[in-house]
Amino acid sequence: MSDDFRKAAHQAADLVSDYLEAVPTRPVWQPTAPADRAALLDRPLPETGTPLAELLGTVGREILTAPMGNGHPAFFGWVNSAPAPAGVLATLAAAAMNPSSAGGDHADVHLERAVVRWIAELVGYPHTPGGGILTSGTSMATVLCLTAARGRAAARLGHDLRADGLAGLPPFTAYATAETHSCVRKAVELLGLGSRYLRTVPTTPDGLLDPAALAEAVRADRAAGLHPFLVVASAGTVGTGAVDAFDPLADLCAAEGLWLHVDGAYGAFGVLDPAVAGQYAGMGRADSLALDPHKWLGVPVDCGCALVQDPAALRDAFSLVPSYLRDEAAGELGWFSEYGMEQTRPFRALKVWATVAHRGRQGIAEDIARCTALARRLGELVEAEPALELLAPVRTSIVAFRARAADERAADALNRALPPAVQLRGNTFVTGAVFEGREMLRACLLNPATTEADLELLVTEVLAARADLMERPVES
């Protein structure tokens, strides 16, 4: 190894440490200056090499100076976490090894088996060896789980889906609420099932998937000659963080022979907070659970996880071992590439291991409990402001709220304009969404470094941006 690399590695450590230390003192986010954007977009392909030290200088001057903002404690946008320091360090070590974690007998493969089990243990999901795999995120984990569900449904009809495709099968129907994450629809479309057969099930008055309405939808589809096969429930919906009632859904799915999948991308780890854990009763009964360590755990992107009750369901859907990949040392579980789409797979397990091991179950639970407590406090601050209204109970760590205006049309226009107006001020960051047809602000708390002062700042900034917008016309 050249001395050049060692010096650059020390330089990189200082650069990253200085960056992380300074994040709370800088604006949360600012638009990229046109000249800086052009410099990134139009950068010419270099004809000759660049020294490592010079490369790092460019990173410091041109990349780290234009962050998304998610490392800042006053960032409340989307569901993007600050990176856990242990995960940052482990990412470098994983890149230095640079294995393909498809399979074989090396540390990354064995460590992935362990951390998948750890994730299952953290959220109370039953784990059988082989019953899970790390993915790029919950979007891919959802594709894997729904592929397994589709395969099981076809097999029960005596159909070899891998050999014959969907031809000859009746339309398969799936069920979810309007608040289900868009990755579910993408997966349904990608799997050739058709989004028209993804039924939108009404919710109960408290915003949860309604088991009675679900049962009626399944009955109607069966009567119409369709083939119900899948129910998607949420452990933390995208709009309000609501957690569906899993036990009655699991009862219905068992009675009807349906696969129950839980989208726990962001919210499944909320089960670690005793104050909200009761909402998650029955989550471990799901046939599959998709979740993201790169969200609430702070594992650096990318890292999702698919967990399944029956490992054979994934392997039946994906296993393909050509002669050039035969490996007698693989053991009875085979390679990870038999459980998903990826052949060459990155070493995701090390950053998960480091993040979880650094905090431990107790530390992770404390971090999550802090976020949910802060979310409830933000809900109180919103309710204390006459110019704001809370749109849904705070169930996990998402707060759905809205600025008031003269009428509904004006309120929609105002709340559509508020997120970018708040973001441009640079002091805090919040994003918007539509909930039950109404434009709203949606604050997600994932950073345990956030303080009550940051919550007060968010409310202050929203009110200030509201005042500015109401002084001039807002496009409706």
Image (cartoon, rainbow, N blue to C red):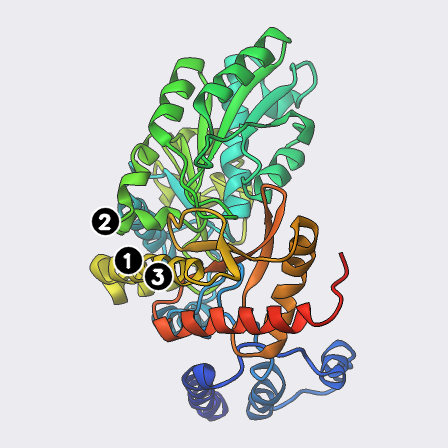
The amino acid on which the numbered mark 1 sits, given as a three-letter code, is Ala
Quarter that holds the N terminus = bottom left
Mark 1 closeness class: few <14, some 14–19, many ≥20 residues within 10 Å: many
Location of residue 454 in the rendering, given as x and y in whole percent from the top left corner: 41, 73
The amino acid on which the numbered mark 3 sits, given as a three-letter code, is Arg
The residue lying at 49 percent from left, 73 percent from top is 460
The amino acid on which the numbered mark 2 sits, given as a three-letter code, is Pro
Number of numbered markers: 3
Asked if the residue under mark 1 is in contact with the one under mark 2, i.e. CB atoms within 8 Å, the reply is: yes
Rounded to the nearest angstrom, the CA distance separating label 2 from label 1 is: 8 Å
Q: What element carries label 1?
A: helix
Q: Name the residue under label 3.
A: 377
Location of residue 62 in the rendering, given as x and y in whole percent from the top left corner: 63, 85
Asked if the residue under mark 3 is in contact with the one under mark 1, i.e. CB atoms within 8 Å, the reply is: no
Q: Name the residue under label 2.
A: 274
Residue 25 position (above or below residue 154): below
Question: Which of the two discs, 1 and 3, labels the residue nearer the N terminus?
Answer: 1
Tell me: 417 left or right of 338: right
Q: Is mark 3 on a helix, strand or loop?
A: helix
Q: Mark 1 points at which residue?
A: 369
Location of residue 6 in the rendering, given as x and y in whole percent from the top left corner: 43, 89
The residue lying at 52 percent from left, 15 percent from top is 216
Mark 2 closeness class: few <14, some 14–19, many ≥20 residues within 10 Å: few
Residue 78 position (above or below residue 189): below
